[in-house]
Image (cartoon, rainbow, N blue to C red):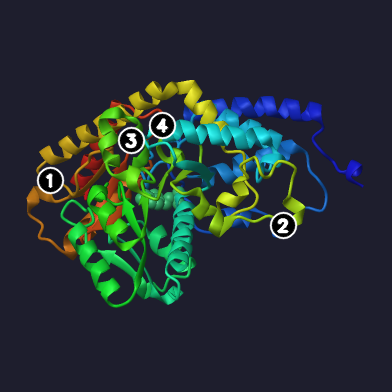
Amino acid sequence: MASDLPRLDIEAFRGEAHRLVDWMADYLARVGELPVQPNADPGTVRRAIPAAAPALGEPFENVMHDFERIIMPGMTHWGHPGFFAYFPANVSPPSILAEMLTATLGAQCMSWNTSPAATELEQAMMEWLRQMIGLPEGFAGVIQDTASTATLVALISARDQALTENPGARLEDLTVYASEEAHSSVMKGARMAGYRPDRVRLIPADELFALRAEALEAAVVADRAAGRVPACIVATVGTTSSTGLDPVPAIVPIARGAGAWLHVDAAWAGSAAIVPEMRWIFDGVAEADSVVFNPHKWLLVNFDCTAYFVRNREALFRSFATSPAYLQAAHDDRVVNYRDWGIQLGRRFRALKLWFVIRTYGVEGLQAMLREHIRLGKLLAGWVEADADFELMAPSPLGLVVFRHRPGGAVPEGAGLDTLNERLLARIHAAGKIMLTQTRLKGRYAIRLALGHLTTTEAQVREAWELIRAAARET
Ligand SMILES: Cc1ncc(COP(=O)(O)O)c(C=O)c1O
């Protein structure tokens, strides 16, 4: 039956693959000429795709044709030089090539036995990354798909640790703490891990958007006095809206005193810790129980690739280890089985792209890139500050610049100013050249510009700033 299927035989595959590589190189070379985001109405792509699967196979060229015709016009180009939205999801040539190999090998890397090289390369890469970001020996690393998953893993580990170490404690007694500026994945993870939503404390942040340690301490003391069990404190190093840096050294003793798990979410900013003079952003992190950062955000590794480090791997196994008869294999007692280190069983071979990227650029090459992005962020922040019609909304220590338009400083605080900036963002986007995102800081509408692509240059940042100013003049 299977032999009757129309298919790309190996020689046809070879030809298509060569053509595809040309397509890929052309795309990378010309992506800046495309609109950064599509001007698509909801449903356009959906309508162009038949409602049911084709009964008969088609030539590959038809599929490729429709990819160009239907899919490409509906894509947002994350690798576009004008893409400054969200945080970046990086692409780089060595990472793309590694992804091609990963897809070709098609390995499912749940256990050492299911691909020894994948497991051992992952161990080695996590060791390289641990050293690169300056975490002490003893932290063990595992690749997760996203920071959201890693934070959920931390919250589950913390839950199980609290229940184990506090006999008699019930799930509804457990409390979780994070800054009011923490990423939504913390609240979502807490909910999924079974914590009661009203036991998740969002601690006020200061004027620099960093968690107030004294408010955290007060909340922990109050909860303990009420008989609750502080299970997890999440500190954010580099908040999504404003690069807020929670004071980890001050949080460590609070976590220790309360017996709570300390998880550090450095999803985007953590990559900067590989730069020696930026290592300070990780002050105190060596004392945490777990740390997450995303090489796919700022270390040139294609999405998805999240590095999760944990101090006590036994705490991971307590929550996640599994060994049914059908998964057991000869060397289980001597090897790492990453299926025991997280939620999913099946795992992609993600370590390969890390290896390709780190070897291609070298640690110094990656450091140089990060330094340049940080420099460009400060440069842009300086331009914003120097312009009387704009206001910088947060410090820019790492390449995220958050600002708003406030012509002549004259428009009063409130809905009018928010609307003005919403209109400005819509106008910027209508031109199709750059893409930014918005947020709210202390209730105020603000526009975010995040740097972080391999190819970002000062000229592009200057061009983006000129586009923003020109749109502001017309708004
Ligand atoms: C601070 C922080 N934590 C977590 C996340 C979620 O990342 P992911 O998409 O990898 O789940 C983000 C995303 O931007 C983030 O900025």
Q: Is mark 1 within 8 Å of ligand 1?
A: no
Find residue 131 and name its label.
Answer: 4
Q: Which residue is mark 3?
A: 273
Q: Is mark 2 within 8 Å of ligand 1?
A: no
How far apart, in angstroms, are the residues tagged by discs 4 and 1?
Answer: 44 Å
How far apart, in angstroms, are the residues tagged by discs 2 and 1?
Answer: 64 Å
Depth order, front residue of 15/139: 139
Q: Earlier in the sequence, mark 4 or mark 1?
A: 4
Which of pointers 2 and 1 indicates the residue nearer the eye? Answer: 2
Q: Does 180 sit left or right of 358 as displayed?
A: left
In the rendering, at what x and y percent does residue 318 appear?
Answer: 54, 58
How far apart, in angstroms, are the residues tagged by discs 3 and 2?
Answer: 39 Å
Q: Earlier in the sequence, mark 4 or mark 2?
A: 4
Give the amino acid at mark 1.
Asp
Give the answer, above or below, for where 173 lies relative to 439: below
Find residue 171 and name its label.
Answer: none
Give the amino acid at mark 3.
Ala
Q: Earlier in the sequence, mark 3 or mark 1?
A: 3
Count neighbours of disc 4 (C-alpha within 10 A) and say few if under 14, some if 14 to 19, many if 20 or more. few
Which of pointers 3 and 4 indicates the residue nearer the eye? Answer: 4
In the rendering, at what x and y percent does residue 24 appear?
Answer: 57, 29
Q: Earlier in the sequence, mark 2 or mark 1?
A: 2
**Residue drawn 64% across and 29% down?**
20
Label 1 SS: loop
Q: Is mark 3 within 8 Å of ligand 1?
A: no
Label 2 SS: loop
Which of pointers 3 and 2 indicates the residue nearer the eye? Answer: 2
| Residue 106, quarter of the rendered image | top right
How far apart, in angstroms, are the residues tagged by discs 3 and 4?
Answer: 10 Å
Q: Which residue is mark 1?
A: 389
